[in-house]
Amino acid sequence: MTSANTMNSSSSRRQKTPLEHILRVALYICLLGMAAVYLMPFLVMFLTSLKDVEEIRSGTLLSLPGSLNFDAWGKAWGGACTGSSCNGIAPYFMNSFQIVIPAVLISTIIGALNGYVISMWKFKGSDIFFGALLIGCFIPFQVILLPMARTLGWLGIANTTTGLVFVHVVYGVAFTTLFFRNFYQGIPSDLIKAARLDGAGFFTIFRRIILPISTPIIVVTIIWQFTQIWNDFLFGVAFSGFDTQPVTVALNNLVNTSFGGKEYNVDMAAAILAALPTLLVYVLAGKYFVRGLTAGAVKG
Amino acid sequence: MANLIIEQVKKRYGSTEVLKGIDISIKAGEFLILVGPSGCGKSTLMNAIAGLDDVSEGRIMIADRDVTYADPKDRDIAMVFQSYALYPNMTVEENISFGLEMRKVPKEERDVEVKRVSEMLQIDHLLSRKPAHLSGGQRQRVAMGRALARRPQLYLFDEPLSNLDAKLRVEMRTEIKKLHQKLGTTIVYVTHDQIEAMTLADRIAVMKDGEVQQLGSPQEIYDNPANLFVAGFMGSPAMNFIPATVVSTDNGIMLELATKTPTLLPFPKKEALNAYLGKEILLGLRPEMITEPQHHKEGLEFVVKSQVNVEVTEPMGADTMVITRINDSEINCRCHPAYPAAPGSDIELMFDTSKAVAFDKNSGERIDA
C-alpha cells in the first residue's frame, strides 16, 4: 500500500515523454467521442423540444432552435392529448408516483427481511429457498402476464393502482432479496450472536443493529427498484385501468395520438419529462451511495 | 458466580459427530480453558454452552439449573468474541449498555454501570467513539466491558486475544487474569494457544477430535499428560519423544539410547515397563530435563550424562536451545547460554528422567500412569 503510493507520486512528478503526451491526448479525444455518441440522442431530443413544428420540418436534427421556446414542454405537461383526454402527462405522473413509491418501499422492506433471514437465521432448506427465489430474477415479464392477470382478477385488484403495486412487489422481491442477502453475507455472524446473548430478539436485532449498517445497500436497492418500476411499460399497459395508467403508458399514447400533424417537439418534451425522476433519483441517491461506502459504515 | 456441569454432550451435523460425549464440570469461580488444535470441537462446545448451537444429546447445567434447551438470553451468560463483534453503528457507551437496555434496566442504573465498567477497563475516555475509530486493543477492552456490564453468572471467552499483536496479547492476558482474581467469576475460555492455557487456567480441558483428552490443572497436564497428544500439545518447546528400547540390566529395567556411546537411562516407574521388555517405547522428556551437566544434580538417582552431537543452537537469551538427534528423532535441550555448544561439535549433556513419562508407540497412551 505504502510502496504503491510512493511509486504513484514519484511517477506523476516525473516529466512525461512526448509519446506519453500524444497518447494522453488521444485518450481524451477517444473519451470525448464516446461521450458525444452517448449524449447525442438526448441533445437531439432537447433541441427538438425547443423548436416549433415549422422549424422541425425545415431544419436538420442538429440545427439550433430560433428562440428558447418552452411551449412544447407546457403542452406536454398539461395539454397534450393521450388517447381521448387532453390533460398532458401530468395526471399520469401522479399515477406513476402512486405506484412507484409504495412498490419500492414494500419490496425493499421485504427484501431486507428476506436477506436478513436467509443469511443470518439460516433454517433447514434456507439455501434451497434462496435458490428458488433467485429463479424469479430470470423470469421474463411477458411470461407472467396471463397468470398475473388471472391472479389480479381473483384478488379483485385488476386495473387498480394496488394491483400494479402488487405486481411490482412480487416481481421485485427476487432482486431486492438477492441484493440484501449478498450484503448481509459479508456481515460477521458473531454480531448476531452477541446481540442474542445481550437479549435482543429477531426484530430488535434487525432494527437496532442490522438496518443502521445497511444504508449503502438500501440506497442501491431503491435506485434499482425505482428505475425498474418507473420505466416499466409492459405491466403498466397490461394491468392498468383507464385512470391508473403510469406515465410510460401515457407517453406511448401521447406519441401515438395525432390530430393533424405530428408534434415532435411535444413528444420529445414529454419523453424527457418522463425520464427526469429516475435521473434525479440516481443523481441524488448515487451521492449517498458513494458516501455510505466511503464512511466505512460496515467496517467495525 | 455459578458452577458449570457438562454431561455427555454430543453434537452431530448430519452423520459427522463433532462432539463425542463431553463431560466437564467446574466449580463456581473457576477459570476453565478449552484448548486444542483447530477443528477439535472447542468452539462448538462453547457455542453449545452459550446456547447459540443446539446439542444433539446430553445436558448442560449452569448454577445447578438445566439450561440445555434454554434460549441464550435466559442463560445469564456473556461472551467475548474473537472478532469482538462490536455493534458498528453504536458508540462504545451504547455497546456496553445495550445488553442492560435489552433487559429493561433504567437509564440511570445503566449509566452507573457503564461508568463502573469503563473505569475498571480504562476506556472511560472512549465512551463516545464508534468501534471503527478504536485500535485493536481498545476494541478488545470494549468487548470485555460489554460482557462485564451485565454481571452474568458465567463468562465465555472465544479466542479473545488471537487478533492482537504479540505484545498486546501478553498484556491483555495478564489483565484478564487480574480481572478474574478481582471478580472471582466463573470463566470458560477457548484458545488454541497452549501458553494462554497454562498461564490463565485453573483447569484445562485439552480437546482433540471432539473428545476431551484430559481435564486437569495446568501443572497436572504439564507433568502428567494422559497421552502423546496432550504431552506434545502442552509446553513450548514441545516435550521430546525419544524412541527407546526397554532392556533388562544388572541394575533392573533401563531404557537404551543410541547416543555416541550407548546410554542406559533409569526410569522412575520401572514396573510399568515390564510388559514392554525388549520392545521400543516412546520416552517423553521435557527440554528442561536435558541440560548441561549441573553440579547439584551429580550422582542423583535418575540423572545420567551422555555425549551428543549438536545440530543447531537457538539462543533465546535466558537459555539456549540445543537441538540434537537421538535414535533418529530431533531432541530439544535447554542449556545455559554460557555452556559451549557449537553446531557440529560433541558435547556432554545431563539427562534427568525423574519426571520422564512413557508412551505406547502404537496407541500413544501413557504406560506408566
Image: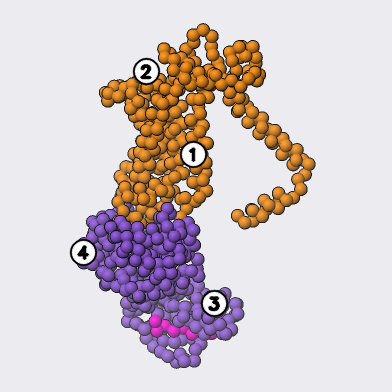
Chain colours: A orange, B purple
Q: Distance between the residues labelled 3 and 4?
A: 49 Å
- Residue mark closest to the camera, 3 vs 1: 1
Q: How far apart are marks 2 and 3 (CA)?
A: 88 Å
Which residue is pictured at 46% across the width and 44% down the height? A216
Badge 3 is on which residue? B316
Q: Is the magenta stretch mostly helix, strand or loop?
A: strand
Say what amino acid the circle numbered 4 marks.
Arg
Q: How far apart are marks 4 and 1 (CA)?
A: 53 Å
Using a 10 Å C-alpha cutoff, classify the residue at mark 4 as few (fewer than 14 neighbours), some (14 to 19) or many (20 or more): few
Residue in the foreground of this view, choosing between A208 and A15: A208
Badge 2 is on which residue? A242
Say what amino acid the circle numbered 3 marks.
Met
Within the image, what quadrant is residue B172 found in? bottom left
Which residue is pictured at 55% across the width and 15% down the height? A264
- Residue mark closest to the camera, 4 vs 1: 1
Badge 1 is on which residue? A285
Q: Please provide percent x and percent y for residue A140.
A: 42, 26
Q: Please provide percent x and percent y for residue B342.
A: 60, 80
Residue B104 in view: yes
Residue B361 in view: no
Give the quadrant of the C terminus of chain B: bottom left
Label disc, if present, on residue B65 of the rendered structure:
4
- In the picture, measured across the screen, residue A205 lies left or right of residue A6, that is left
Say what amino acid the circle numbered 2 marks.
Phe
Whether residue B104 is situated above or below residue A98 in the rendered picture = below
